[in-house]
Image (cartoon, rainbow, N blue to C red):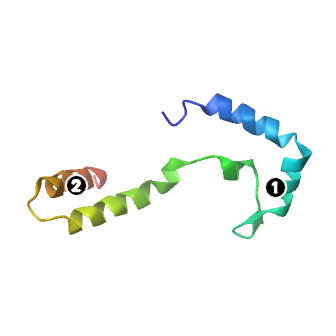
């Protein structure tokens, strides 16, 4: 699913890159102390995978022990840590 619209996204970003107003926006905006680039507009879900695993583990720890939800979250956490 992630790469489903990749060709279209690349084409859109390529078109934006040729626009002077967009290039000016990129040159003056800063993120984390550096100039932005087209890469800053590409969603990279893999970067957030570790945080997602931590969130699921926290939910599992705070769910009622022995409940169906807690067992389901436990299976997810155990599978993620393998």
Mark 2 vs mark 1, CA separation in Å: 42 Å
Q: Is residue 65 above or below residue 22?
A: below
Kind of element beneath mark 1:
helix
Q: Is residue 70 above or below residue 13?
A: below
Report the number of numbered marks: 2
Give the residue drawn at x 23%, y 62%. 60
Give the residue drawn at x 85%, y 58%. 27
Q: Is residue 64 above or below residue 20?
A: below
- Side of 7 relative to 2 (left or right): right
Residue 12 in the image: x percent, y percent? Answer: 73, 35
Count residues near mark 2 (Cα–Cα under 10 Å), then give few for <14, some for 14-19, many for 20+: some
Residue 8 in the image: x percent, y percent? Answer: 67, 30
On the image, which quarter does residue 71 sit in? bottom left
In the rendered image, which residue does mark 1 sit on? 26
- Side of 2 relative to 53 (left or right): right
Kind of element beneath mark 2:
helix
In the rendered image, which residue does mark 2 sit on? 73
């Amino acid at each position: 699913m992630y790469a489903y619209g990749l060709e279209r996204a690349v084409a859109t970003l390529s078109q934006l890159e040729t626009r002077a107003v967009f290039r000016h926006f990129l040159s003056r905006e800063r993120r984390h102390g550096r100039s932005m680039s087209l890469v800053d507009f590409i969603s990279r879900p893999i970067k957030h995978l570790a945080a997602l695993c931590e969130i699921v583990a926290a939910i599992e720890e705070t769910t009622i022990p022995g409940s169906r939800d807690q067992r389901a979250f436990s299976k997810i956490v155990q599978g993620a840590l393998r």
